[in-house]
């Protein structure tokens, strides 16, 4: 394997672009970021696969074959090639598609156990997170599930586009984040600290794994 750490700054900039390297604290952090993406890729993939299968399980119920897919809103129907098998349809849809399915059918809270959502403290992912909206209203289980899913999507997209997972915003908070608005238009923002990424993924996978053990 090539040892990129032996490259000079100029060589690194020439290979990866000056602009890309400049967005990191150092060339070392750039390569640390790529190593981190490699380390979390398996659990990111597992999380996405388990999530879409869980959604299918919830939506299918006693409905046979493609029936629940045929009852999706028209804007989602356009993404489905009905000539494919159900398995193929499920495996080829994007994570964004699945989050829209969740929103359309309001099944957020069904994806995770009652106890997990009830006891979830977002401070475990970043100490300055608050478990409430900016107007002081506490997050309900539905809100917590929605934030988790958006956090997973944002992490997945940034990682698989090889973006800087160490990057901070101007307020010195992690750029990895998710936000939702309440019915009264108040904002809730959750940040994900880089060294807590694996904690988040293990929490998500653990929830799905726990259900499999109990069935």
Image: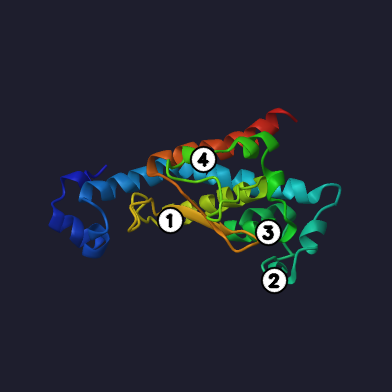
The answer for how far apart the CA atoms under marks 3 and 4 are is 21 Å
8 lies above or below 69: above
Q: Residue at x 70, y 49 (%)?
A: 55
Secondary element type, mark 4: helix
Residue 129: mark? none
In front of the other: 99 or 124 = 124
Disc 2 marks which residue?
Answer: 75
Secondary element type, mark 3: helix
* Label whose residue precedes the other's in the sequence (3 or 1): 3
* Label whose residue precedes the other's in the sequence (3 or 4): 3
The answer for how far apart the CA atoms under marks 2 and 4 are is 30 Å
* Label whose residue precedes the other's in the sequence (2 or 3): 2
Q: Counting other residues with Cα less than 10 Å from the Cα at mark 3, is it few (<14), some (14-19), or many (20 or more)?
A: few
Given contact means CB atoms under 8 Å apart, are the residues at marks 2 and 3 in contact? no
Find residue 34 and report its horizontal and vertical position in percent.
34, 48
Disc 4 marks which residue?
Answer: 201
Q: Which residue is drawn at 63% across and 61% down?
A: 97
């Amino acid at each position: 394997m090539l040892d990129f750490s032996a490259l000079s700054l100029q060589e690194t900039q020439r290979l990866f672009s000056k602009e890309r390297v400049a967005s990191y604290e150092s060339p070392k952090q750039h390569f640390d970021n790529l190593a981190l993406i490699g380390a979390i890729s398996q659990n990111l993939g597992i999380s996405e696969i388990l999530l879409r299968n869980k959604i299918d399980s919830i939506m299918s119920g006693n409905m046979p074959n493609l029936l629940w897919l045929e009852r999706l809103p028209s804007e989602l129907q356009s993404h489905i090639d009905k000539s494919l098998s159900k398995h193929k349809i499920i495996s080829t849809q994007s994570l964004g598609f699945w989050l829209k399915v969740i929103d359309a059918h309001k099944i957020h809270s069904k994806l995770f156990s009652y106890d997990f959502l009830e006891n979830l403290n977002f401070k475990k992912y970043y100490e300055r997170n608050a478990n409430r909206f900016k107007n002081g209203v506490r997050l309900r289980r539905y809100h917590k599930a929605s934030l988790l899913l958006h956090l997973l999507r944002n992490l997945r997209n940034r990682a698989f586009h090889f973006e800087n997972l160490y990057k901070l915003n101007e307020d010195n908070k992690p750029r990895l984040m998710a936000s939702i608005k309440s019915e009264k238009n108040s904002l809730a923002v959750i940040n994900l600290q880089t060294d807590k990424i694996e904690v988040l993924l293990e929490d998500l996978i653990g929830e799905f794994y726990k259900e499999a053990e109990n069935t």
